[in-house]
Amino acid sequence: MTARRAIAAASALAIAAPAAAEPFVDADLRVTVAFGDGWRRDGVARRWRQSATGQAAAIVRLDVDGAAARRDPRRAFARVVAGARATAPGYRELRRRIGREGRIPRLDLWYRYDAPGGDRPVVALRVLWFRRYAVVLVVDTPAARFRAQRRAVRALLRSFRPWWPN
C-alpha cells in the first residue's frame, strides 16, 4: 500500500468513526454534562431526548437559598425528596446519596413512579446546590429500558458537575 492510500484510508476511518460526545456547558448555570451518543436537543432550551431508548433529560434551575443547604444539607435534601414524593404518584425511592462536588453540596436521587398507561419509569436526578440557586439534572427512563441503561444513566449523572470559567 502506498503512503497516499494509507493516508486516505486513515482519513476515511477517522471521518467514519463516531466522535466522542462534546460536553454540554451552560455558562449561565455554571454546570457541564456529557451526553453520550444518540442524545439530541428537544427544541426546548435545556431538554434532550434519546430516541433509541425513549429517555428524556432536562436541566432546571431552582431559585433557593443555597446557603441553608450548605449549613444543613440533609434538611434541604429532605425537601427535595418530599417534593418528588408529593408530585410522583406511586413514588418508590430506589437510591439516595448525599455528597459534594468540591465545595458544592450534591444529592443523587433515584425513584420509580406510576405513569399513565401502567408504566413505572425510573427517574434519576442530581441536585447541585450553589450559593443562591440549585441546578437539577433529571433523567427519565422507561421501565422496559432501565436495566439496560442503568450504567449510562449513572455515567450521565456523574458527568453533571459544576463548571467554572478559566
Image: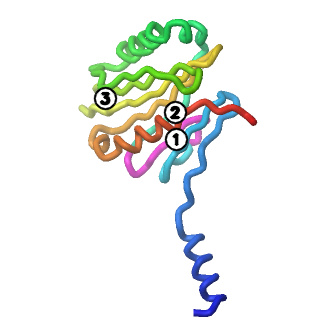
Q: Which residues are magenta?
A: 42-54
Find disc 1 in the rendering and name its residue: 48
Residue at point 43%, 25% (across, down): 108
Dot 2 or dot 3: first in sequence order is 2
Q: How many marks?
A: 3
> Which circle marks residue 92 in the picture?
none
Name the kind of residue labelled 2 in the image: Ala
Badge 2 marks a residue whose secondary structure is strand
Compare residues 37 and 129 and report the one nearer the observer. Answer: 129
Q: Quadrant of residue 15?
A: bottom right
Q: CA distance from mark 2 to mark 3?
A: 18 Å
Q: Quadrant of the C terminus?
A: top right
Find disc 3 in the rendering and name its residue: 115
Q: Quadrant of residue 79?
A: top left
Find disc 2 in the rendering and name its residue: 58
Circle 1 Cα neighbour tier, 10 Å, few/some/many (<14 / 14–19 / ≥20): many
Q: CA distance from mark 3 to mark 1?
A: 20 Å
Q: Quadrant of the N terminus?
A: bottom right
Residue at point 27%, 34% (across, down): 119
Name the kind of residue labelled 1 in the image: Trp
Badge 3 marks a residue whose secondary structure is loop
Circle 3 Cα neighbour tier, 10 Å, few/some/many (<14 / 14–19 / ≥20): few
Compare residues 150 and 63 and report the one nearer the observer. Answer: 150
Q: CA distance from mark 1 to mark 2?
A: 6 Å
Q: State yes or no: discs 1 and 2 in contact (Cβ < 8 Å).
A: yes
Q: Nearer the viewer, mark 3 or mark 1?
A: 1
Q: Quadrant of residue 28?
A: top right
Residue at point 64%, 89% (across, down): 3
Q: Position of residue 46 (x, y in %)?
A: 58, 35
